[in-house]
Amino acid sequence: MDPAVLLAAGCAVAVFGVTRMSREPRRLSTGFFLLAAVTLVVAGAGTAAARLAALSASDSASVLLGALFLPGVILAGLALLTNGITVTRREGVRPTTMTPVLLGLGLLVLPVAAVLALRRGPAVPHWLMLVAATATLVGVYLLAHLLAFAVHAFVYGRLADEPGADAIVVLGCGLNRNRVTPLLAARLDRALRVHRAETAGGRAPILITSGGKGGDETVSEADAMATYLVAAGVADTAIVRERCSRNTEENLRNTLDLLGSRGLDPAESRITVVTSNFHVLRAAALTRRLGIEAHVVGARTARYFIPAAFLREFAAVLTTHYRRTHLAVATATVVALTAAGVDAYLST
């Protein structure tokens, strides 16, 4: 394809994605437009470079695949595998800490599956080619979702704070029995900065600490967070404790009830939600689904822990969103692979 067409299409998609982002930054589908824009621009630049080098179309595809996709996937797989080992050593073996290890191994297997799926000849059994093709399609599909989610999260996390909040909600993330953990302390410190900026502007938003009491905790997260904020100089009367929630959705739903009980219309009130940087986009998407007018800001997290935590968020989004997309793609894949299998069987 003409590189000028690819570059123009990439720019057009980028403009559309940025416009969509400016109007409603919490739509998860916007990430696919941003990813498509980057992909088209890279493909256009690569095609232009290949033409300058007088390469054929097949050679250009091989160069792009060999010079960009395969090394990128392999390097990403090795990086995730290394990070998974690091975070497992520091945090222990848990589903969250093992996620980078599993994804890293999957990325290292993906190029092998892609090569097998593209091979031809009697040396490769048809059944193995079908398995490789299935693994490649699933891997590329999940990788596209991950990249779209990552691009969107990166952009959303750098949006400017929106002043004028009626309430500031701090989402809980577990205690060390009755003490605030470093992860939760970072959220509370970010909430303090937001609250001070609001009060400096002449506003008086309420501060809602949201989190129930876990089985291994001696107090509720809401009470422990409130104690931390009071010690930092916030008036106790400015804090509302939401002690019943067990997850992010309950945090937000219960917050709506609290706002209503205090005379604030949940449909009209503006809320700033404070969480960790890896959790920002999923929390933002959830506020949109619940019809909450909210802006989500993130607190910094230890760098070594971000990949594992971010992948956990991605897995949660993957299982709660895109269900119709998953079903449509799965149906099309099954039909295509069945047809390929039947054709392979009849040709033997």
Image (cartoon, rainbow, N blue to C red):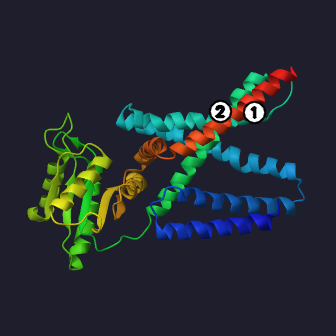
Can residue 292 be seen at all in this image of the molecule?
Answer: yes
Q: Amino acid at mark 1?
A: Ala
| Front residue of 297 and 282 | 282
Can residue 113 be seen at all in this image of the molecule?
Answer: no
272 left or right of 1 in image: left
Residue 27, horizontal then vertical, whole percent: 48, 59
| Contact (Cβ within 8 Å) of mark 2 with mark 1 | yes
Mark 1, Cα crowd under 10 Å, few <14 / some 14-19 / many 20+, is many
- Name the mark on residue 135: 2
Residue at position x 36%, y 57% in the image: 287
Choose top left, top right, bottom left or bottom right for residue 37: bottom right
Mark 2 vs mark 1, CA separation in Å:
9 Å
Mark 2, Cα crowd under 10 Å, few <14 / some 14-19 / many 20+, is some
Residue 167, horizontal then vertical, whole percent: 23, 65
Q: Amino acid at mark 2?
A: Ala
Residue at position x 44%, y 65% in the image: 158
SS category of the residue bearing label 2: helix
Residue at position x 43%, y 68% in the image: 159
- Name the mark on residue 203: none
Residue 126, horizontal then vertical, whole percent: 78, 24
- Name the mark on residue 117: 1
Choose top left, top right, bottom left or bottom right for residue 245: top left
Check the picture and name the quadrant holding the C terminus.
top right
Choose top left, top right, bottom left or bottom right for residue 257: bottom left
| Front residue of 94 and 204 | 204
Residue 79, horizontal then vertical, whole percent: 55, 43
